[in-house]
Image (cartoon, rainbow, N blue to C red):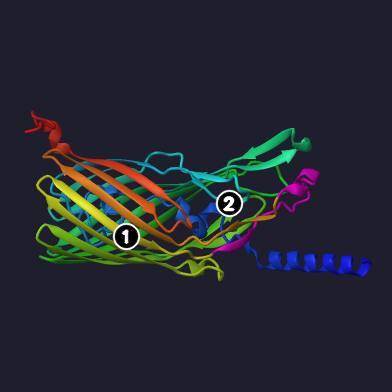
Amino acid sequence: MRYTLLLAMLMAALGLAAQSADSLEFPSPQFVNPIFDSFSRNYISSSAMGRGYTGVAIPGGVDNVLINPAAYIPSKASLHLELLVKPPVDVDFYSPEDRLTSTAPFGVVGVGGKLLPNVTGALLYSLPKTLKLDDFSVEMNMGYYVLMRYPSFNLHQVTANAAWQLGDLSIGLNLHNQVYYLSDVTFLRTFERIRQGKYFLRPQLGLLYSGDKFNAGLSVTPPQNANWDLKYVEYDTQLPLNAVLGAAYKTGNARFTAEADFEQDSAISDAYKDRYTIRLGAETTIRRFSYRAGYIYHPEVWHGNYKLPVNTTANADTALWWNDVPLGGFLGENTQHILTAGASWHHRDANLNLGFLIDVAGKAPVAQVSASLDLYLSAFKNKKFLFFD
């Protein structure tokens, strides 16, 4: 019996060691890792979202700048305001009671118009990624006190855009001023609250060909080195290359779009796969209304067990309460199949847009509702401002 018990304990220890060896160590800070994109990403541009978040090959409004910097070809200067809502999602990252929320009901605000006869420009503020975990807690004093932490990640982005129209060809450039703000980054063996903001300037190049029936578009965001010092862990990583190629075909009042999106996540970690996203969309315009529908295939880049970073410095907290805290978590399969729908109402002075999406695969559930307003600045000079005729 003694030898059997020792053998069982040895097998258990070997199993735990093997599991620990197979666990992922974050190559980037917590929710910045692309493995969480299925939950953190906000689909900005309610009109594009309705048609499967396609827009790289379609001339659009100010919000379309964020999809393709060459795809903003306005007839008049306009203001764009957009709100979004993402319902909470129940997940099992650390414990079965975990819940992910996106606390900012805000997508984008921007203004744009013609700078010269063949040159357009725009300025936008947006929130491409937001995520908050409710919650990561540590029970102390026999459960009479609970240390509460709410790890969160917000990507703030201010974009300056310029584009040149050369006949059927447009060339555009975005300069994204990005601030990655992390709060309550999870570390074991410390009760310190780690918060940090990090600034990056990221360019995005775009091309758009507009024909009578056929359009083609290309958007490229080059990779960029990224270094993070979060006191207990330093990350020497990369913001990955992203390239999108798309086409659109118009017949009558209908338009059909297709896009392939490539993200080189393998450059961040050998454990990650590159992401190949496929997006399909359709829309039709009848009188003052446009109706849209679409589909998004958003594959995972990794799933499995991961380790939480640990404070290994001389002042590491060795309180016995840490003995019951999990040393890591688990991210399940997170490939998404997303259906989208949307509509727009077109007025002489403004456009009102609505968009909706929902994951139907159920492995990484997500839903989003967006509403936006495109208001032409010339409307303020109109005595019949927003007049319904």
**Label 2: which secondary element:** loop
Q: Quadrant of residue 281?
A: bottom left
Instruction: Estimate how packed mark 2 is, as few (under 14), some (14 to 19) or many (20 or more) residues with alpha carbons within 10 Å.
Output: some
C-beta proximity under 8 Å, tags 2 and 1: no
Check the image and report above or below for 3 versus 389: below
**Label 1: which secondary element:** strand
Q: Quadrant of residue 246?
A: bottom left
Query: Of the numbered discs in the image, which one, if any, rests on residue 92?
Result: 2
**Residue 239: within the magenta?**
no
Q: Amino acid at mark 1?
A: Tyr
Magenta segment main secondary structure:
loop
Say whether residue 1 is left or right of residue 149: right
Residue nearer the viewer, 163 or 59: 59
Q: Amino acid at mark 2?
A: Asp
Say whether residue 198 is left or right of residue 41: right
The image position of residue 312, as x and y in percent, is 74, 54
Q: Is residue 183 visible?
A: yes
**Residue lying at 58% horizontally and 41% vertically, measured from the top left:** 150
The image position of residue 78, as x and y in percent, is 20, 42
Q: Residue furthest right?
A: 2
Q: Residue furthest front?
A: 1
Residue nearer the viewer, 240 or 299: 299
The image position of residue 274, as x and y in percent, is 46, 69
Q: Is residue 319 visible?
A: no
Query: Of the numbered discs in the image, which one, if any, rests on residue 114?
Result: none
Q: Which residues are magenta?
A: 303-325
**Residue with the mark numbered 1:** 295
